[in-house]
Image: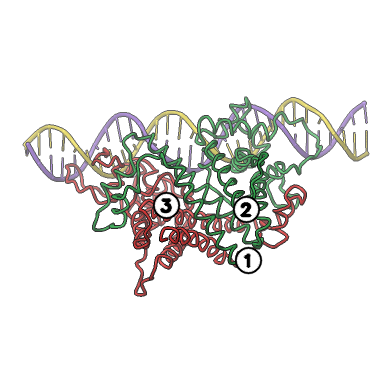
Chain colours: A green, B red, C yellow, D purple
DNA sequence: TGTGATTGCTTATGCTATACACAATCATGG
DNA sequence: CCATGATTGTGTATAGCATAAGCAATCACA
């Protein structure tokens, strides 16, 4: 379980990249990283991230807790692998290939959002670094590919994808956590709560927003709000590309 | 410690809004919420969020652990109050009042970034809901105020601020965690690590980005990257406003 | 004056991650 | 063919965590 194949990455992560195929002495492993991760993901999906403890995952596998540490150096690594599995490979544009970067990125964003909504537990995992696992890189690949013919610099392309992915994750996190908070305490309604706290004198702009119905309790127009942010970002990118072309 | 003044919020949060001034029997409280939060923030600042446990905070205050629970119903509430204290009031534009929404929002973003860089522990706290504490609302107020004369709907203004705050937080989180990861294992360099893992065949666009120097190991141009994302967003908002005006 | 609410404390419960030592396994070097 | 040493799974142990429950001291108000 030493971590050197030149990458400086933990062994479990290198395994995820398929770079560990050693034949070694000792008993045959009864588990596989894949099976462990799969079980943990299943658990997170059904009972939430809070239920994912090493003890619990091991119990689910019918194995002692410490057995897991033969495959993973720390829980953080397992979580990282869970993330990668949860995100999965980006869907390939099926048939009707989107033409143009804008359609491509828009599709990318909606696909990503869809994944986060399907696996909301992913949003409970704090981001601890730049994308480094295979599936995350695959998503990055698809996003960068959409920008292939745009004339942006490589650095700009990367920044664009980071900007977009940050937006999607952020927005998904906010809506999901708000929805969960609402379910938890039936009485909590953001808009009406805020209106009770906010003083017209001290917070005139926020008061105006409340009065204008901007802070709504129900979330029927959630998709519309997502679209709004997405279109703003795409517009901003469009402006840059026009500047670049002239 | 019952939670009803009509808002449905925990008592400690209502206290933060200054809505609890009861005179009650029983011994005078030896602590104050403020002092507890202050101590916890100090601890987070010097030793990181991981060091903030109820046991530790109590020890720091020279008090039994359970004493804290007379002021806070759960650790989550303390954390929420810590966040509010850490974010603080937004700096008031001093003297040279920014003219125009664009300058205003740009300033807002840089100010917010500055706060997050000063209190990086804030980035370790997952967002659990929409902004509800006084200082968070104050930041929202300042942002909305900058959009006062733009002709956007209230709902759009709010979306804009959410978009912007999400971007800043996201970007700060990524850079800080990357920097910390780099400090942790001296050998870890994102760019070179990625180049070892990424296969030209399978990930051509990512390979091109690496080859193009987009994924750089050092972070000298961090500010430039932040500016890039910020300008893209502001451009996008500008486009919307032009559409709205015509 | 005394009643009941409130504070802070002690103690206890059931979790968590993970360090360590050990027995069983098995590919490989002699 | 056999011994060596690496590797696996296990049981046990430690140090930490949030927080529930009960108890003694305090003090505003009826």
Q: Residues within 10 Å of mark 1 (few under 14, many from 20)?
A: few
- Tell me the element at label 3: helix
Looking at this view, name the residue that lies furthest to the bottom. B96
Q: Say which quarter of the image contains residue D27.
A: top left
Residue C9, how many percent across, how many down? 32, 42
Chain for disc number 1: A
Mark 2–mark 1 CB contact (< 8 Å): no
Q: CA distance from mark 2 to mark 3?
A: 24 Å
Residue at left offset 61%, top offset 66%: A244
- Tell me the element at label 1: helix
Q: Which residue is mark 1?
A: A245
Closer mark to the observer between disc 1 and disc 3: 1
Q: In the image shown, does B47 or B227 lie closer to the viewer?
A: B227
Image height of D24 relative to B115, above or below: above
Closer mark to the observer between disc 2 and disc 3: 2
Q: Residues within 10 Å of mark 3 (few under 14, many from 20)?
A: some
Residue A4 shown left or right of residue D13 in the figure: right
Q: In the image shown, does D20 or A234 lie closer to the viewer?
A: A234
Q: Which residue is mark 3?
A: B159
Residue C18, how many percent across, how many down? 60, 41
Classify the position of the C terminus of chain B by image quarter.
Answer: bottom left
Image height of B205 relative to A90, above or below: below
Label count reads 3
Q: Which residue is mark 2?
A: A101
Q: In the image shown, does B116 or B33 lie closer to the viewer?
A: B116
Residue B72 shown left or right of residue A33 in the figure: left
Decide if residue A240 is in sight here: yes
Q: CA distance from mark 2 to mark 1?
A: 15 Å
- Tell me the element at label 2: helix
Residue B66, how many percent across, how many down? 34, 41
């Amino acid at each position: 379980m030493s971590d050197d194949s030149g990458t400086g990455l933990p062994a479990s992560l290198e395994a995820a990249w398929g770079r560990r195929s050693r034949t070694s002495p000792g008993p045959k492993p009864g588990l596989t990283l894949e099976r462990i991760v799969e079980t943990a993901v299943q658990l997170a999906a059904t009972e939430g991230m809070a239920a994912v403890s090493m003890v619990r995952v091991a119990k689910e596998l019918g194995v002692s807790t410490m057995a897991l540490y033969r495959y993973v150096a720390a829980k953080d690594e397992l979580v990282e692998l869970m993330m990668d599995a949860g995100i999965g490979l980006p869907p390939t544009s099926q048939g009707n290939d989107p033409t143009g970067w804008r359609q491509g990125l828009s599709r990318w964003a909606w696909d990503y959002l869809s994944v986060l909504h399907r696996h909301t537990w992913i949003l409970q995992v704090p981001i601890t670094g730049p994308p480094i696992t295979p599936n995350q890189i695959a998503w990055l690949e698809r996003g960068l590919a959409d920008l292939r013919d745009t004339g942006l610099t490589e650095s700009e392309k990367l920044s664009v994808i980071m900007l977009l992915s940050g937006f999607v994750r952020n927005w998904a996190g906010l809506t999901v956590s708000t929805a969960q908070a609402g379910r938890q305490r039936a009485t909590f309604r953001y808009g009406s709560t805020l209106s009770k706290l906010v003083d017209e004198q001290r917070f005139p702009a926020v008061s105006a927003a409340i009065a204008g119905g901007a802070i709504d309790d129900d979330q029927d127009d959630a998709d519309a709000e997502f679209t709004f942010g997405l279109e703003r970002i795409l517009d901003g990118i469009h402006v840059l590309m026009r500047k670049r072309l002239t």
